[in-house]
Amino acid sequence: MNIKKFLGVAATLLLSAQAYAYNCNGVAQYVDGRSYTNNAIVQNAGSAFSCKIAGWCSIGGPYAPGTGWASGEAWNNLGSCGTTTTSSTPVSSARSSVASSTPNTGGNCPNWAAGTNYQIGVVVRYNGAFYRAKNENPGYDPVISTWYWEPVASCPGGTNTSSSSGNNGTCAAWVAGRMYYAGNTVSYNGGTFRAKYDNPGYDPLISTWFWEPTSGCNGTGTSSSVSNPGTGFGAVVSEAQFNQMFPGRNPFYTYAGLVEATATYPTFAGTGDIQLKKREAAAALANFSHETGSFVHVTEIARGLYCSDWGNLATCPCEPGKQYYGRGPIQLSHNGNYCAAGAALGLDLRRNPEIVEQNSKVAWQTALWFWMTQSGSGYRPAHDNIVNNYGFGETIRTINGSIECNGGNQAQVQSRINEYNRILQIIGGTAGNNLGC
């Protein structure tokens, strides 16, 4: 649905310094605010970086590689520079991949093959460059699927070079500031912990979204993945439950991206008693699922320009060649919404609306911001409708107003209610009052 949404978020800093060095000879020095393309390589603050998302890399300031507080959202850290020769010229297209620096191939990495299942830590060769699987995937393209892959400077034999596990079942002691990858195990304060996600040495007892207790070393612990990552949404809906809810979803809609996004809004599924928290989680997922065909569609089926006067063309002109069709769980649409979203997020979404369909976390954030703060076509934000016991039906009114409510389209209302009840059954929640509108 084409809903007016005004978005905002405080991005979370997750800098991941690599455990290897990078040959920075000839790599251009980063220039704040200069335009960069995807996979462009620069050096800054003594390290080399590869651009993940052009729209963010070109903003500078908080997204400056290695120095900005949101650097990790825009850039991959390729490693500390060795002997470098600083260049003041922009990164050329010939240097816009990891292969622009002669790699130390080390091991014998296989060529990437579409449709092959890759485990976390596997390194492959692709278009002359090397990429490491950050997350397990069924053969997604390393250049396109940047959530699943990251560029690396060399081939360590197709395995993870990070050292955190010991031999003979003895885990190495955790070290603050050391880079750990998903699956690494460490000993800490008499316990053993397994990294659920890559992290730059976060405390296993404090950063429970990144670590989980385990009974074994060398990545062989028996505890389940992402069983309880935090005290908000992640504590209400587990990854296993999320997968059960939406087994056929588009891989773009990741559980990890959702949990990261909800961490920005701690009161989402974090207000009231456990039943109230479950209602909000189920209500949001039900509505988002309805909007996207059970999380199958990342973008609107009938794509259009969606450049309109209500978007205030004087202050928010439509960028030539760009379209503002619906994207993400709440289907953000129209130029005015992209301008407002960009202003709130610190992103130039007017010039780069495609970011919403390229970054899972951002897509979830756009939906959650609307859910938490915007009244839409109703009387109050969807979050307020749930936590103040106005009922699930009022969340439908907030999203679609009279198009569905007040007899507008009872079949669509019932479809949302059915989805809400289905999700509640999976997580063991109660529906509350006023299901319809």
Image (cartoon, grey):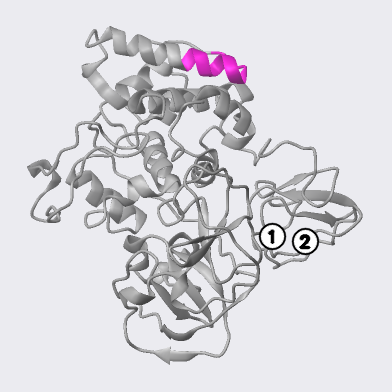
Q: Quadrant of residue 198?
A: bottom right
Name the residue nearer the viewer: 332 or 119.
119
Write the start and end of the magenta stretch as one range: 420-430
Query: Looking at the picture, which amino acid does disc 2 mark?
Result: Ser
Residue under the point 74% across and 66% down: 176
Asked if 181 appears above or below 63 in the picture, the reply is: above
Identify the mark at residue 311; answer none if there is no mark.
none
Specify whether 322 is left or right of 143.
Answer: left
Query: Is residue 249 inside the magenta stretch?
Result: no
Q: Which residue is mark 2?
A: 164
From the top left corner, tell me how far across and down residue 333 is, in percent.
23, 39
95 lies left or right of 308 = right
Across and down, in percent, residue 323 comes to 18, 46
Determine contact: label 1, label 2, CB under 8 Å. Answer: yes
Per the image, the residue denoted by label 1 is 180
Res 172 quadrant in image: bottom right
Does residue 238 appear anywhere in the picture? no
